[in-house]
Amino acid sequence: MKKLPIIGTMPIILDMDADSSPDSKGEEMGETAHSHACLTSQNAYQTAPQLLYELQVEIFARVPCCEYWKLQFLNNQFSQLLKSSEIFRTRRELGLVKPYFFILSSSDRRWTMFDEDFKSSQRLPKLSSDINFFSGDKETICVGTQLIVIWRNKEGITVWRYELAMHKWFKGPELITPRIMFASASHGTNAFFAGGFTINKNGVEVVSIVEKYNAETKTWASILPMHRRRKLCSGCFLRGKFYVLGGQNENNENLTCAESYDEETNSWELIPNMLADKNFMF
């Protein structure tokens, strides 16, 4: 096991055999006051001791995720630590990853986050957007420690993300090709978005476009498109591959085929008639 040196203030150890006479007490009080003044001077611009960076991460990785947003108010150092995602990488290495559930009722504009046992909950901040954003269904997915919400407002198709570490909503980053009604699935800190349809001045266009979102870098990247154009499709991750199932093509015809994407080979495999015996309802 790697030993980490601890850098900080020296602990105060009481000597139980020391003389407790009034004179010695006065001296002790003077020394204590002097020590306190020194510590105050040294820590004037700090709200926490100067622990080794790795040790800070090890300690705060064990704090419940729902409490992380409070750390940003300690000082700039802890705020930057949260933004770096280093705490969450350490949690994964230590096996401290826990699932959370996000629920939005039809009559509410605020999501509620529940722990895996539904024994505790926390209300998310209000998402400031126009009424059009809340009037219809929204595309939502969790990736890493973020909740991604995509739908239309008066400005067009918009992406919002909630960051657990900061307990805040942020706008963007926008999709490379803005669209809705796509298939999506996440794995770790990456999420894949396939198909759907775009809305522009020429109308609606069903696409085979695929994009990958990285929650750590907050960036989008285009990857190889699918074999078929499709909308209203479903997505999932299974055994390291991203699967896109069913949906409708550009002629509004139901698709019975599926496709799987292998990131290692950067290739799509078409799976015909996977849903041949299924009934479709859209």
Image (cartoon, helix red, strand yellow):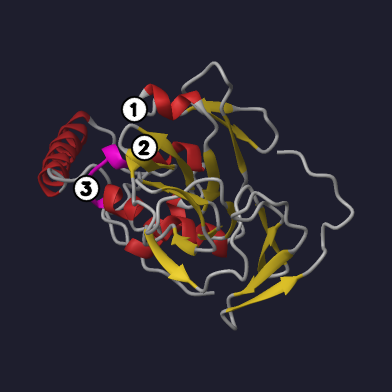
**Can you identify the residue that label 2 sits on?**
169
Asked whether disc 2 touches disc 3, contact meaning CB atoms under 8 Å apart, the reply is: no
Crowd class of label 3 (few under 14; some 14 to 19; many from 20; radius 10 Å)? few
- Nearer the observer, disc 1 or disc 2? 1
Image side of residue 246 versus residue 60, left or right: right
Visible residue check, residue 172 = yes
- Residue in the picture at 35% in, 40% down: 156
Whether 75 is among the magenta residues is yes
Asked whether disc 1 touches disc 2, contact meaning CB atoms under 8 Å apart, the reply is: yes
Image side of residue 164 versus residue 15, left or right: right
Mark 1–mark 2 Cα distance, whole angstroms, equals 9 Å
- Nearer the observer, disc 2 or disc 3? 2
Mark 1 vs 2, N-terminal side: 1
Pick the residue in front: 135 or 202: 202
Q: Secondary structure at mark 1?
A: loop
Whether 247 is among the magenta residues is no
Pick the residue in front: 173 or 162: 173
Label 3 is placed on what type of residue? Asn
Visible residue check, residue 49 = no
Label 2 is placed on what type of residue? Trp
User: Can you give x and y, in whole percent of width and height, for residue 251 in the image?
Assistant: 62, 53
- Residue in the picture at 62% in, 45% down: 99
In this picture, which residue range is highlighted in magenta? 71-77
Task: Please identify the dominant SS of the magenta region.
Answer: helix
User: Can you give x and y, in whole percent of width and height, for residue 274 in the image?
Assistant: 82, 62
Mark 3 vs 1, N-terminal side: 3
User: Can you give x and y, in whole percent of width and height, for residue 279 in the image?
Assistant: 84, 45
The disc at residue 76 is 3
Q: Secondary structure at mark 2?
A: strand
**Can you identify the residue that label 1 sits on?**
128
Label 1 is placed on what type of residue? Ser
